[in-house]
């Protein structure tokens, strides 16, 4: 092999090595779904460790204090968990406490001197109520969210006990037509944002109309004019303010 050929081969080897080195600094999620990366915020473990509860929703967080930049040197943990409350998934900080006390030490031991970031839906994506711009971000993330779990470094599944809820039935005399209603799983909820102050409010769950149990939102069409409704309060929205 000539000196010129050997020199070219060496240069190619260096270039190839350089390319591999650059690729090492690009996180798999960045490489495979840059659109998702551009539309979500990744929460730092340090923020979760010092946060007060209940943690505010995404839009109310200080971006400099709560979020970090995803790079090839980051370890990304995608959180999978159930929401027991419609407006806040962890009002008492039970899940965050599990992350901080149980998993954070293991992650730090496994990945010393490495920035550990979380994809945590409530904190990473704009929550309701949203502006038009925030809705656009939200819709984009929903189309791409599976990528966070496919290309993360770890998926963390968290299960907790069902929380205790206030099961006190409240009653109010209202005009059914003054409200908008929605079916959420097996509950009938108030959908309208602005409602009479003396009746159920948004996300409250209607159990009875007069003395009859109601199980489907269509059943409310049978009730006209003024009726007495029995409902459960849902004040989890207050936690996001």
Image (cartoon, helix red, strand yellow):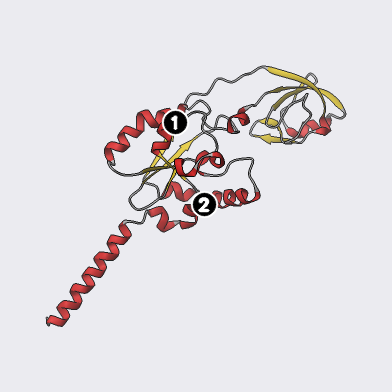
Residue 216, above or below 38: above
Residue 89 screen position, x and y as percent: 53, 32
Tag 1 secondary structure = helix
Specify the quadrant of the image occupied by residue 25. bottom left
> Which label is found at residue 96?
1
Residue 184, above or below 125: above
Crowdedness of circle 2 by 10 Å Cα count: few (<14), some, many (20+)? some
Residue at image x 82%, y 30%? 176
In-image side of 83 versus 178 (left or right): left
> Rounded to the nearest whole Å, what is the CA distance between mark 1 and mark 2?
23 Å
Circle 2 sits on which residue? Answer: 39
Residue 146, above or below 53: below
* Name of the residue lying farthest toward the right: 225
Residue at image x 79%, y 18%? 211
Residue 215 screen position, x and y as percent: 71, 28
Residue 151 screen position, x and y as percent: 40, 50
Tag 2 secondary structure = helix
Upstream in sequence: badge 1 or badge 2: 2
| Image quadrant containing the C terminus | top right
| Image quadrant containing the N terminus | bottom left
Q: Nearer the viewer, residue 188 or 233?
A: 233
């Amino acid at each position: 092999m000539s000196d010129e050929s050997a020199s070219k081969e060496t240069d190619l080897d260096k270039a190839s090595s350089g390319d591999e080195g650059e690729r090492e600094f690009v996180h798999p999620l960045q490489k495979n779904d840059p659109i998702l990366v551009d539309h979500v915020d990744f929460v730092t473990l340090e923020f979760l460790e010092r946060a007060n509860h209940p943690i505010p929703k995404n839009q109310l967080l200080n971006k400099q204090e709560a979020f970090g930049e995803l790079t090839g040197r980051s370890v990304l943990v995608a959180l999978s968990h159930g929401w027991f409350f419609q407006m806040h998934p962890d009002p008492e900080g039970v899940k965050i406490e599990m992350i901080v006390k149980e998993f954070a030490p293991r992650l730090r031991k496994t990945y010393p001197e490495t920035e550990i970031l979380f994809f945590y839906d409530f904190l990473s994506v704009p929550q309701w109520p949203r502006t038009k711009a925030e809705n656009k971000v939200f819709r984009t993330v929903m189309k791409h969210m599976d990528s966070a779990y496919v290309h993360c470094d770890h998926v963390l599944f968290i299960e907790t006990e069902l929380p205790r809820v206030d099961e006190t039935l409240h009653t109010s005399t209202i005009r059914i037509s003054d409200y908008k209603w929605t079916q959420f799983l097996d509950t009938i909820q108030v959908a309208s944002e602005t409602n009479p102050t003396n009746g159920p409010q948004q996300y409250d769950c209607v159990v009875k109309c007069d003395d009859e149990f109601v199980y489907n939102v269509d059943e409310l069409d049978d009730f006209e004019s003024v009726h007495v409704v029995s409902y459960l309060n849902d004040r989890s929205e207050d936690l996001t303010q």
